[in-house]
Each structure stands twice: as structure tokens, then as C-alpha cells.
Image (cartoon, rainbow, N blue to C red):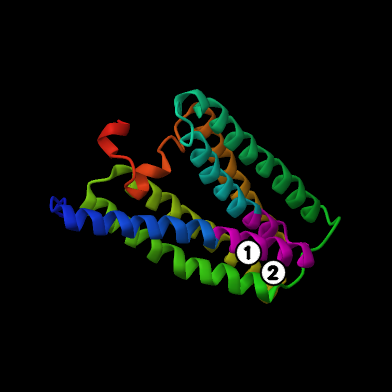
Amino acid sequence: MTTVATDPVRIGVLRRRIRWIVAFTIAYNVVEGIIALIAGGSASSAALVGFGLDSLVEVLSAAAVAWQFASPDPESRERAALRVIAVAFFALAVYVSVDAALSLLGVREPEHSPVGIVLAAVSLAVMPFVSWLERRAGRELGSASAVADSTQTLLCAYLSAAVLLGLLANSLLGWVWADSIAAFVIAGFAVREGLEAWRGDACTTPVGVLTGEIDDHDHD
């Protein structure tokens, strides 16, 4: 069982660590999203395009929360921020589902994407480690929000696994439908995230809490 840190010096170290982890996660998602969109467009891969869009929506989510808490009265912006996040996820789900359906109907056929395979493999290797680092720091700091954010990062790793399996099945076995199945998995994840945001169950923790700029108990 992890002991919650009480030493101010150690608490400062853990807060800085989480700040760097959050910053890295956002930066990584931006790069990952751009690469996935380019590779997905070139290979007509609904799974890769969906993967890229999901990464960028996650960045939008963080940006919306940052915008909310930049206000002197964050509560006044909360509903608008959550609605933006929810609509973005719903739009992602619709776009990816239609794209995947077109592939299944043979309107377009996804091609082999070495870049996509490498990207998904790298994400599958990196994200669980990042999630573990944040969860470990969050538990020692006693921050439920940081632990929750680490779970979100782990879910991204699961998406990476789904995309990787779909791309490999298409490339190695010629199962073109596998790309669409992976895309539908992403769409389902997006709907889940959108519903949580719409209900106000997600993204209600300020970035400041995760980085230690706002005390977790004050937020509660």
C-alpha cells in the first residue's frame, strides 16, 4: 500500500512530476494525432483516422478545461466546456462510424500502413508506462484526480492495441474488415466519453489540481 506523502519537499517533487507527465501527455497526443491523420488519410484507414482524431479531441478536452479554469468564475464556464467536449466526441464517433461503414461496403479499401503500425506500437509501449508513472505519483500525493487521469491514459493504450491489431490483421492476413472493426471500437469509446462529458461526469477536474497549482481539497 502506498503511503501518502506529508513532507512538503516530497509533495513539491510529486506535483512537478505530475505537471511534466501531463505536459508530455498533451504534447504526445498532438504529435500522435497529426501523424495518425496523415498516415490514415494516405492509407484510407478509418481506424488510423479515428485514432488521430481521438488524440486531438483529448487535447481539445484538456484545452477546454484549461479555458474553464482561466476564468475568475470557473463554474460559469463549466457547462459550456463540457458541451464542447461532448459534441467533439459525438462528432468523432459519427465520422469514424460512417468512414468504417464505407470501408465495409467496399467504397474504399484500407491499405497497408507501416507508419500506422509503428505509431500504434509505440503508443502501446509508451502510454502504459506514462499511466503507471502518473498513478504512482498520484497515489503517493493522495490525488484522486491524478489517478483518474492515469486511468484515462491507460484507456488510450487500449485503443492503441485495438488499432494495432486491426492494422496488422489487414496487412498480414488481408482482413480489410479488421480496420473497420478497430474504427468502431474507437467510435464506441468516443460515445462513452461524450456521454460522460455531457452528463458532467468527465473532465470536471481542473488542470491545476493535476499539476498541484490548486489544492485538491479546495477543489472538492
Start-end of magenta stretch: 29-52
Local crowd size for mark 2, using a 10 Å CA cut-off: few (<14), some (14–19), many (≥20): many
Residue furthest out toward the front: 72
Return the x and y of residue 216 as percentages of the image width and height. 29, 38
Q: Is mark 1 on a helix, strand or loop?
A: helix
Percent position (x, y) of residue 98? Answer: 76, 45
Q: Quick one: quadrant of the N terminus?
A: bottom left
Viewer-proximal residue among 56 and 210? 210
Q: Does the magenta stretch include residue 212?
A: no
Q: Quadrant of residue 10?
A: bottom left
Q: Position of residue 155 (x, y in %)?
A: 46, 53
- Residue designated by label 1: 166
Q: Work out whether 95 lies above or below 218.
A: below
Q: Which amino acid does label 2 sit on?
A: Asn
Q: In the picture provided, is 77 more to the left or to the right than 116?
A: left
Residue at the spot x=64%, y=57% of the render? 52
Say if residue 89 shows up in the picture: yes
Which label is found at residue 170?
A: 2
Q: From the top left corner, tell me how far across and down residue 183 is, in percent.
A: 65, 53
In the figure, is residue 17 to the left or right of 63?
A: left
Residue nearer the viewer, 86 or 168: 86
Amino acid type of the residue tagged 1 in the rendering: Gly
Is residue 32 found inside the magenta-colored segment of the image? yes
- Residue lying furthest top: 76
Mark 2 and mark 1 in contact (Cβ < 8 Å)?
yes
| Mark 1 to mark 2 CA distance (whole Å) | 6 Å
